[in-house]
Structure formats: C-alpha cells, structure tokens
Amino acid sequence: MATVQLTKVGKVYAGERGVHFRAVEAVDLAIQDGEFCVLVGPSGCGKSTTLRMIAGLEEISEGVLEIDGRMVNDVPAKDRDIAFVFQNYALYPHLTVAENVAFGLETRRTHRNALVAALTGAGTARGEESAVIRARVAEVSKTLGLDALLHRYPRELSGGQRQRVAVGRAIARDPKVFLFDEPLSNLDARLRIETRTELRMLHRRLAATIVYVTHDQEEAMTLADRLVVMHKGRIQQNASAQECYENPANRFVAGFIGTPPMNIVDGHLKAGAFVANGVSVALGAEHARLGDRASALGFRPDRVRLVAPNAPSSVSASIAAIERLGDRTDVALDSPWGRVVARLDADATRALREGEAAGIAFDAAHAHLFEPGECGGRIVA
Amino acid sequence: MKRPIFLSILLWFVLIMGSAIFIFPLWWMAVVSLETPARAAAAMRGGIGLLPRDPQFSNYAEAIRQTGSVPWMGFIDALSNSIVVTVLVVLGTVLSSSLVGYAFARFRFRGNTPLFLIMLGTMMLPGQVTMIPLFLVFRSFGWIDSILPLVVPAFFGNAFFIFMYRQFIAQIPESLVEAARIDGLGHLAIWWRIMLPLCRPVTAICAVFTFIGTWNDFMTPLIYLHAPESMTLAVTLNSFKGQYPGINNVHLLMAMSMLTMIPCIILFLAAQRTFIEGLARGGVKG
C-alpha cells in the first residue's frame, strides 16, 4: 500500500488555434496510506481527469505526482503499480472471468520472466508461476464470490457480476493504489447501495489506498475517509465527509453536499439580520459584528421548522409540493426568498396540504453565511 | 404475422426460380463433368439432360491425371502452389490490414484523416491501371517467376479491409485499450491479444474473401509466373484447355473446375456463422 501526493497538479488541453482549456488547476492533495479518498463533483469538474492523471492514462501538464514518495509524472501506467476500475468495467470480452482476473498477472509474468526462463531453460519455473497465478485467481474469486462464474464470459454476466469481476481484476494484482472511476453508476439503485457497502468492507479488509471518483454525493459521503469536492477543475474542500457537511468551505460545497441540497438565498446582511427581497429575519447578536454586506444565507432542509404564517422571525410562504417518504416528509415552499425545501418528521406533517400558507423559520445557529458568487467562501461569525 | 397462402406460394415460386437461375451453371458443370466425352461434346452444342445418363466418376481421376504436363504430379504441383500462395496471402492480408486499421482507429497523429482518405482513394484505381507499373517494379526486383509478386503485396494491407478493421476497432471502447495499457501491454500486444480476437467477424470476412479471390485469381499468376510447375490451379485449368484444343475434353475441364471450387465452398460454409457473430459486445455494459 502507498501514499499518493499531488502537488500543484494541473491539466491543460491544447485546443484549436492556441486556445487552451484548463480541466484541472493547481490540485494539492495528500492521500494517506490506506485511506479511502473520494473525489466528488458535478460532471466536467475535473475529478475523472485527476484520477486518470494518477493512473497515467492522461499526461500531467503541470505539477508533481508522487506515489509512495516516488515522482511518477513520466512513468507509464503499467509501471505505476496501480489498478483501475472503469465505469464500463472494460472486461476483455473474449476472455473468461478467470482469464480476465489473471490477465494482468500473466502479462507481468511474460515481461519479467520470459527472458530469464528462456535463458535458463527453466520450463518448470513457468509451470510454478502458472500455479501461483491460479492460486491467486482462486483466492480473489473466493473473496468476491466469483467461484461459480470463473468459466463464464463477460457477456454472460449481469451488471453486478461484471462489476465484481472488474474489482477482482484490480485486487488480483495487489497494487499499491486502487483507482475507481464511477464504478457503480451502471448499476441499479438497490445494487448500488449493496455494492457500496461491500466496497467499504473490502477496503477495510485490504487496508488499501483507494482513490474513488463519483458524481453521486451520497455515495461519496458514505464511502469516504476523505472527501475532496471539486468544481471547475479546482478543489473546493478537502476534509472528512462530516466536516464538509457541517462546515462547508464555500457556497458550492454547501449546495453540493447533502440531500436535499441546502437552501441558499442571495441577499445581504444588515445589522445582524438577513434581508432578501424585502423580507428580513434576525440572525443573532454575533452576526451584527459582521457589518452590512452582500452575502448568501444557507440553511439545511432539516433545520427548517414550519410555523404559523406571519410568526415573528419567519418568512411567510405557501406549500408548493409535499413529498412523503414514510419516516419523513420533504415540503417545498414558495416564498419571497424563492423555493425553500423543508425536511420534516412525518408525524408532524400529516395535516399539511399543498397550497396552504405556512411560515418558514430556521435555526440561526446552524445557518451559514457565504460571500456572494458561485464559490463564495463561508463567512464565520 | 400470418401471410395469405397465395402470397406465400408466389414468394416461394419467385425464390425457387431465382435460386434455379443461379444454380443452373453450377449444375450444368456438374452434369457435364460426369458425362461421357461424346455426350459432353454434345452438351456444348445445346443438348443436355438434367442428370447424366451414365455417370462417369472416372472423369475426375482422369482429369487429375491429365492436369499439367506430368501425369498426377502436375495436379499435385498446382494444388500445393495454390495452397502456399493462398495461405500466405490470407495471412498477410489479415495481419497487415488489421494492424493498419488499428493504427488508423486508435492513434491520434497529424495527418490521420488525410492519409486515411488517400488510402480509400486507392480503391478507385482499377487493377489494370497499376498492372504494368507494378510489373516493371517487380521485374526490377528480379521477382519474376517467383511467388513474391503474388504474396508480398498482401503484407502491405488491402484498402477495403483496412477500412473495415478501422470501422470495427473504432467502436471498441477506449477503456479496453486503457485497461490493457495498465495491465502492461504495448500497442503491438494490444493489437495481437485484444483487438485481433475481438475482430473475429471482420477477420472471417477478410479471410474468406481474400481466400476466394486469391484461389481463383487468374491474372496475377499468369503475369508473373512462367514455369509450368510453379503455376497455380486456376492457371493450370486454362492450360488444360489449351492442351487439348477444341471441345473434346470438356468433361475433364468441368471435372477439374468442380474440384477447384470445393475449398471455397467449404470455407464459405464454415465461416458463415462467424460473419454474423458480434463478439465485441458484452465486456462492457449494454
């Protein structure tokens, strides 16, 4: 196992007539030995490109990449001792499951020992190595429950089975670092959640260093030891999942992490109160120190309470939609502050009807203030 | 869907008539090859039955014996020449066309598209245009009366099959190539161990067409080969006819033609299944 260290890593694509496109910019990231690091962000945020640079599938335009302390910028993918699990699995269609799992071991054997075997005439060495590979394949397939599938071809497998073979192929080589590129996105929802748990358990068993890319923030939060939120080629926050959720570094992270997303309202701060569209709500004494400034207010749906319309410190609204999820209910409200979502206890919402008037109140202690702009930083009171 | 009965009958009638028209020459050849010399000669003037009256299977042995200048051996020579040339040409065409097709499909290099278009453009040139320049080139190499002019060009690709391989390889997911790179394969190994096995349907088409084309090729061996013992079967057939002027031995000519066709027919039937096989799908989602 190993550490992965990115220092000011960037990726620039040369476009037509000297127009360059920066896919990744100045990414600093230190991944510890045995850490499960998840890169998450919307599509086009540069997370996959970053992963592919670590793998050696993309050239690194700027900066330094080190695996286990060794700079590997110019080391070809095959010599980086990494394993890559592709979104579409990329199993070799003409090989059986067993051959797929063994493939990486076979090619390595050919490279390293073919010459030695030829020179020494050691025919038995080849046989012994085959036995080692067979044993390894058997071990991996047992770990992943692939035993019954070893002689099947990929086209004869279900999506979940193919996914497991792809993981098996990665494990077989016992690489320093595992790289996953959205490995669950082709699975149906139920299987995705099951496989997620399996991956987490597998990580603990292997104590492997994993870099994992996904656009699904829920998947990211459940898997990550370290969550790296990316947007527009830059790291927006690099912290634990809980930290990203509780103390988002900026407005983008606040809006991206959490389901349903945080309610964010553009307005300004005026004497300790937040004013937007003419409606003002007092926040508290400590906010008065921040002075008067343009800002955005964020509060999570589960911190919203519904009160009587026109109650003090509330925003009056009407109920636009009610989504009952069994144990809880998501209520979408139209207000002068725009669309606000509240996540409420199911029992408390039985009497609510769409179209009714309500007041929105929230817990000021758990609200966040951000600088204006898409990635405006969090203002700490 | 149920078709009205009269429509079915009409359809069957048209199909059977069509098949009959296509099969007739072959059938005629088979019948004549089994006739006595007198009746075969009569067939040339228009009289033929649907079945030979008195099948002469010895015609085949006789045809083999009389092929070439040396009894029995002439046939063996021609057959082995044809086999050697055809196998080498098929091998060369499949290997070179798939390799070049892989490069066109997967390498991003300056001039990829223009080069590809130029290559496709060469398909417009009829063979007769290049015949004389090619002959002069091969003569300057001193390759006349050897199999080199027949075989070597095949190792430099065939525009149409390169096109087919390129199109096929282009739709194989890039991630497969990347997985192979991580597994430690270079481009040649990816071509050999990943692409060629996946391209089986294209290879089947390429191999069968090349086989039939080369096996039946009359012009190229005729131009480059002189010695009777280095001739291929297709050319020997012709000298067969020249050997016995007139139409006296037409039954032997037909017998020999039947024999010559057999490998092509067997190969075509054997490869038919692979033609329609879509192997590339399955390793990725979908």
Image: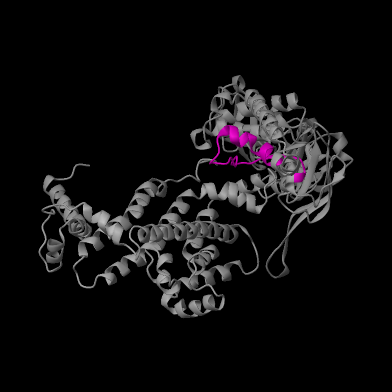
Above/below status of A71 relative to A136: below
Indicate yes or no whether the magenta region holds residue B258.
no
Residue displayed at 50% across by 62% down: B163
Image coordinates of residue A100 in percent, x first then y, are 60, 36
Residue at the outermost top position: A347
Task: Give the color scheme: rainbow, by chain, secondary structure or one colour.
Answer: one colour
Image quadrant assignment for residue A41: top right
Residue A379 in picture, x, y percent from top left: 84, 42
| Quadrant showing the C terminus of chain A | top right
Rendered location of residue B170, percent (x, y)? 54, 55
Q: How many marks are shown on the rendered structure?
A: 0
Tell me where residue A30 sits by quadrant: top right
Q: Quadrant of the N terminus of chain A?
A: top right
Q: Horizontally, is A365 left or right of B17 in the view? A: right
- Residue B107 appears anywhere in the view: yes
- B120 or A43, nearer to the observer: B120
Quadrant in the picture for residue B105: bottom right
The residue under the point 56% across, 31% down is: A160
**Foreground pick, A183 / A222:** A183
Q: Is residue B19 above or below residue A208?
A: below
Magenta stretch? Answer: A79-108
Percent x, y of residue A320: 56, 36
Between B23 and A364, the residue placed more toward the observer is B23
Looking at the image, the residue that sits furthest to the right is: A289
The correct choice, above or below, for A152 with respect to B46 in the image is: above
- Residue A213 appears in view: no
| Residue A91, magenta (yes or no) | yes
Q: Nearer the viewer, residue A159 or B169?
A: B169
